[in-house]
Amino acid sequence: MKADRLVAALLLIQARGRVTVREVARELEVSERTARRDLEALATAGVPVYSQRGRGGGWSLVGGARTDLTGFTSREIGALFLAAGPLSASPELRSALRKLTRAVPAPMRPHAEAAARAVAVDPVDWSRTEADTGGPHRHVLERAVLDGERVRLGLGATERTVHPLGLAAKAGRWYLVAGTDEGTLCAYRLSRIARVEPTGQPAIRPEGFDLAAAWRELVAREERRMAAVTVHARATSDVLPSLRRLFGGRLRVGAELPGDKVEFIAAGSSLPALVGQLAGFGGQVEVLGPPEARRSLARLGRALSSAHDSEYHEESHFLLGTYYSEDASVADGTGETASTAHATARTT
């Protein structure tokens, strides 16, 4: 936008004292003709800039006039650059950082530049898995939120038209908070969105909408779903740290028992999910109830023994599932597999 270029040009003159049309064009990535028109527009608008021809000439501010960002302390500027530095892959943010660097008072500028280089972010964890940065559609959705434009989301084999209301990050994962035509509040994990199509239609934003409050409501809804069922069990105390890491706040530890054991209650979204998670602890965890959880674990034990012990020939109709901390599945007695997925109850 022209207004953005005019501000950037003014800050560039202020930072350097004197600039040529060619320098302005190169810095703002425009033609020299456009740069000259912008500088002339500043003068026409009453900004005290003037041009000087000849060798060593250029555009300057009359009498050393200045405009700067007031009210910022050195620590505040440093904190801002520390936060923005690792995210500066966005062209818009790089442009904003350049403008901010030129706008801060000269004594603070080296501190701001050092802060922008003080943090490095490696998006790959120790298992060589790349972190969830929001996927390829994040910038499109950000624009849709800011512009208030309704979008059509491709979610696997289905499509949904939603009203973007904001973006939220939780535990390293990004979500789109959106409303539906029916007035339901939903959250969609960005990495699971296959495509985004702007519709050109205005999004409906509820009056007085508060993103933080809406996200708390969605999180509370998801937490209730994730604690829909419970299992009562006991375990050897040495596996308690692993249980805490697996279940987090969904684990309630009870009384200590003889033989260096403890009782606990673990909550999950479904009984098959909980059984699948606890099965990995083998004999270190004994499920006490409910009875169907004990039966599922017994069937699982027979199936594992049948699959891995050539001397064990008892037939089992138990279908082995895939056991992960977030997506566990265990078959019931009918052979149908029940599973839990990360996206739920309007948290897709």
Image: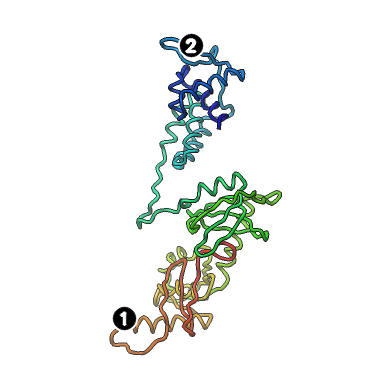
Q: Which residue carries the number 2 mark?
A: 52
Q: Count residues near mark 1 (Cα–Cα under 10 Å), then give few for <14, some for 14-19, many for 20+.
A: few
> Which quarter of the rendering shows the C terminus?
bottom right
Above-or-below relation of 143 to 102: below
Classify mark 1: helix, strand or loop.
helix
Where is 271 relative to 167, above or below?
below
Q: What mark, if any, has residue 243 been given in the picture?
A: none
For residue 308, the mark is 1
Residue lying farthest left?
310
Q: Name the residue: 41% across, 36% down.
A: 117
Percent position of residue 287, x then y: 48, 78
Between residues 304 and 138, which one lies in front from this camera angle? 138
Mark 2: few, some, or many residues within 10 Å (few <14, many ≥20)? few
On the image, the x and y values in percent for residue 150 come to 61, 51
Judged from the image, the secondary structure of the residue bearing numbered disc 2 is strand
Q: Nearer the viewer, residue 218 or 194?
A: 194
Q: What residue is shown at x 46% (from left), y 74% (from top)?
A: 329
Q: Amino acid at mark 1?
A: His
Mark 1–mark 2 CB contact (< 8 Å)? no
At which x and y percent is residue 43?
57, 17
Q: Nearer the viewer, mark 1 or mark 2?
A: 2
Classify the position of the N terminus by image quarter. Answer: top right
Is 158 located above or below residue 288 in the figure? above
Colour style of the rendered protein structure: rainbow
Q: Residue furthest right?
A: 207
Q: Position of residue 161 (x, y in %)?
A: 60, 57
